[in-house]
Amino acid sequence: MELIKKPTTGMKDILPEEEIIRDYVIDEIKKTYGRFGFSHIDTPCVEHIENLCSKQGGDNEKLIFKILKRGEKLNLESANNENDLVDSGLRYDLTVPLARYYSNNQSVLPQPFKALQMGNVWRADRPQKGRFRQFMQCDIDILGEASNLAEIELVLATTTLLGNVGFNGFKVHINDRKILKAMASYAGFDEADFDQVFILLDKMDKIGLDGVCEELADYNFDEKCIAKYRELFEGLSAQENKLEYVKEVLGEFIEDGAADNLLEIIDTVNASKGADCEIVFDPTLVRGMSYYTGTIFEIEMAELNCSVAGGGRYDKMIGKFTGNDTPACGFSIGFERIITILLERGFKVPGTEEKEVFLVEKGMSADRLGDGQ
């Protein structure tokens, strides 16, 4: 068998030049988030398969690197399907492991608990620019805080970090799952169809409103619902104050306080931010994770045609472990995408000195070296 010198597909070797930048960004993450009061924790890279397949990770559950049972537990003859052969898997994100961690250690953790977690995750995804099958994630989460203070602090901490490592002019998109549901209800879609409607709405930035409506029609949704949905988004696009328009048009369909909460978060962040960025209400922002229950956000940078950070509120996840719902909200930066941008910029770590090489002729005396000859 011939040995292969290239890394496995979707993974990469990290050369010294990149590792210097990665170490620098990691150090800035620890310092910046530490100043915001987040405690650095760690969780195992291997999780119980039951946790990973708990229908909370959306499409990521299709991308799990599963781990076979070991020793006598691995019985190929009696196995009826794949589930009989595996008992664990590599984590595909840091949120599910955090929920298990908090549930297991809640009695000894401060309340509310502000966690910083960094580590590799694995997804059997199709590799592309800035996306690998093994990659570093960096999350901050606030557990046990139900108010908007959690969202405000997460956005301020994340934007401050990005500013500290040299990014500016980026945009924070913010929405609320409750507003998404209100818009779908207003249009007349059945609640059972919301997830499919949101999946198609999430394509708005790629295929436009016409494309979204065409795909809704392909799924045989009612023409009147599609027309009302289109009318809503056409009206939104013409408004300068979209949140006020949403409150006015959706009326009884929107949960009390959902729009006001977003307005408070936007106003507070804009008044307090230290980074050069903009935070805007985006009614088309969906985020695919099924565990989000309220506020959701993403950060967009012009240098990559995708988001470089995202997160939201997931108040129901911890309750699946403990039986008691716990307020939870988190923000994850795309560490690898940020490193990709810095490398393409030719970024140099501040304070890094150029290396000097001294050549010494064999047999040269110490006196001549001292004279600088």
Image (cartoon, rainbow, N blue to C red):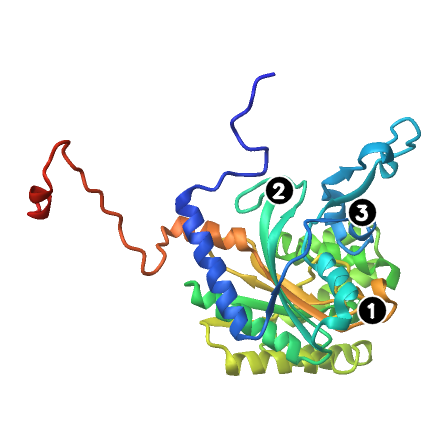
Q: Amino acid at mark 1?
A: Ser
Q: Amino acid at mark 3?
A: Ile
Q: Residue at x 46, y 76 (%)?
A: 274
Q: Residue 329, located in which quarter of the rendered image? A: bottom right
Location of residue 271 with respect to 76 vertically, above or below? below
Q: Regarding mark 2 in the picture, which secondary structure is present there? A: loop
Quarter holding the C terminus? top left
Q: Regarding mark 1 in the picture, which secondary structure is present there? A: helix
Which circle, 3 or 1, is nearer the viewer? Answer: 3
Q: Amino acid at mark 2?
A: Arg
Which circle, 2 or 1, is nearer the viewer? Answer: 2
Pointer 3: what residue?
A: 49
In front here: 5 or 253? 5
Identify the mark at residue 185; answer none if there is no mark: 1
**Which residue reaches farthest top?**
1
Identify the mark at residue 134; answer none if there is no mark: none
Q: Find residue 285 and report its horizontal and vertical position in percent.
A: 66, 63
In front here: 28 or 70? 70
Q: Residue at x 58, y 72 (%)?
A: 155
Q: Could you classify mark 3 by the number of other residues whose Cα lies within 10 Å: few (under 14), some (14-19), or many (20 or more)?
A: some
Location of residue 93 with respect to 167 vertically, above or below? above
Q: Regarding mark 3 in the picture, which secondary structure is present there? A: helix
Q: Are marks 3 and 1 in contact (CB under 8 Å)?
A: no
Q: Earlier in the sequence, mark 2 or mark 1?
A: 2
Q: Find residue 64 and report its horizontal and vertical position in percent.
A: 73, 43
